[in-house]
């Protein structure tokens, strides 16, 4: 029909403009229903065609102006209806490329992982936002908190304010996991906690062949055994019957944790992803 044809001609591209045209169609049809221009819609003449086009364009313009040329305060009100995007927080498991992710985040002004706690020249972090003083003793809770499983960090902060705020509160968490075999080999070559640590005092391994597969296998077995023993002692001494970490005091000369536990370089990846509730 002529009405449908003219409506199609008047439509703009895009969803919003199609909505405007449909509203214009409703306006024209309502006129016809009220018989304001009844009599020439069924058998339109040239003049009625021109009048119909004019009316259609006028109605379309009115709809567009009313709907899309909105006062500034109305626009603000419409925008505030949408909830803000959820903040993302990175959980840094050792030897999974976490430093690269922290570096990428800080490039865009986002503190992730260690960047929350300190300035790190290698990563580029320069604006920590959580108060943190490194301990002079080994502690599962206090040493390198950015490597701590989220559930452990949350429990400790609940018991002790030493670590300040919890970066994971109110955030969606993401992490990176790695094939366990690849990860343990990377730990073996790690200059911090590996077979031949960079800053090891009196380190006799520096004169040995680090690429010897027998040394690699023996070292891995030794680390797994030590970690299992350290975790067992920690759980027995520092958890209540419900499994929660109890409040405890630590110092340079008392109640220290083994370095293998405090540094968290061998903690199972599953501990970072799941808790007792799954």
Image (tube, helix red, strand yellow):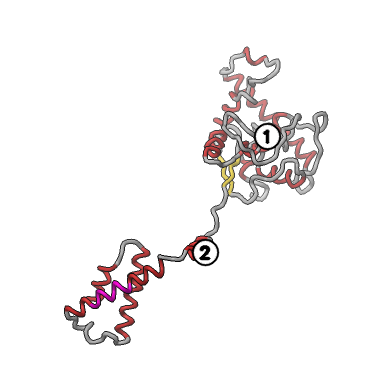
Image height check: is 117 above or below 21?
Answer: above
Q: Nearer the viewer, residue 220 or 157?
A: 157
Image height check: is 1 above or below 164?
Answer: below
Identify the element where label 1 is drawn.
Answer: loop
Q: Main secondary structure of the magenta part?
A: helix
Identify the element where label 2 is drawn.
Answer: helix
Kindly identify the residue that appears in the image at 62 percent across and 12 percent down: 207
Mark 2 Cα-neighbour bin, 10 Å: few <14, some 14–19, many ≥20: few
**Magenta span includes 57:** yes
Kindly identify the residue that appears in the image at 81 percent across and 40 percent down: 248
Kindly identify the residue that appears in the image at 52 percent across and 37 percent down: 107
Disc number lying in front (2 or 1): 2
Could you say which quadrant of the image residue 144 lies in? top right
Residue 227 locus on image (x, y percent): 69, 31
Q: Nearer the viewer, residue 28 or 198?
A: 28
C-alpha gap between disc 2 and disc 1: 44 Å
Tag on residue 144?
1
**Magenta span includes 225:** no
Image position of 271 (left or right of 107): right
Image height check: is 136 above or below 12?
Answer: above
Quickly name the residue at label 2: 77
Residues in magenta, as a range: 51-59
Kindly identify the residue that appears in the image at 63 percent across and 21 percent down: 195
């Amino acid at each position: 029909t002529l009405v449908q044809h003219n409506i199609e001609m008047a439509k703009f591209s895009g969803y919003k403009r199609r909505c405007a045209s449909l509203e214009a169609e409703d306006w024209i049809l309502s006129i016809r229903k009220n018989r304001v221009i009844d009599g020439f819609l069924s058998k339109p003449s040239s003049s009625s065609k021109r009048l119909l086009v004019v009316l259609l364009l006028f109605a379309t313009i009115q709809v567009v102006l009313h709907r899309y040329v909105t006062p500034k305060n109305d626009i603000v009100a419409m925008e505030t209806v949408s909830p803000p995007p959820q903040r993302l927080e990175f959980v840094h498991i050792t030897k999974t490329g976490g430093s690269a992710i922290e570096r990428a985040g800080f490039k865009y002004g986002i503190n992730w992982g260690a960047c929350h706690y300190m300035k790190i020249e290698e990563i580029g972090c320069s604006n920590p936002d959580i108060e943190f003083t490194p301990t002079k003793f080994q502690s599962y809770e206090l040493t390198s908190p950015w490597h701590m499983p989220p559930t452990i960090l949350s429990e400790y902060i609940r018991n002790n304010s030493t670590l300040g705020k919890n970066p994971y509160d109110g955030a969606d968490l993401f992490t990176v996991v790695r094939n366990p075999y690849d990860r343990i080999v990377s730990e073996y070559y790690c200059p911090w906690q590996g077979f031949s640590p960079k800053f090891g005092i009196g380190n006799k391994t520096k004169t040995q062949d680090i690429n010897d597969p027998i040394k690699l296998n023996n070292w891995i077995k030794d680390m797994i055994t030590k970690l299992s023993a350290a975790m067992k002692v920690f759980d027995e001494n520092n958890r209540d019957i419900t499994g929660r970490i109890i409040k405890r005091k630590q110092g340079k000369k008392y109640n220290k944790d083994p370095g293998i536990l405090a540094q968290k370089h061998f903690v199972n990846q599953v501990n970072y992803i799941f808790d007792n509730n799954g």
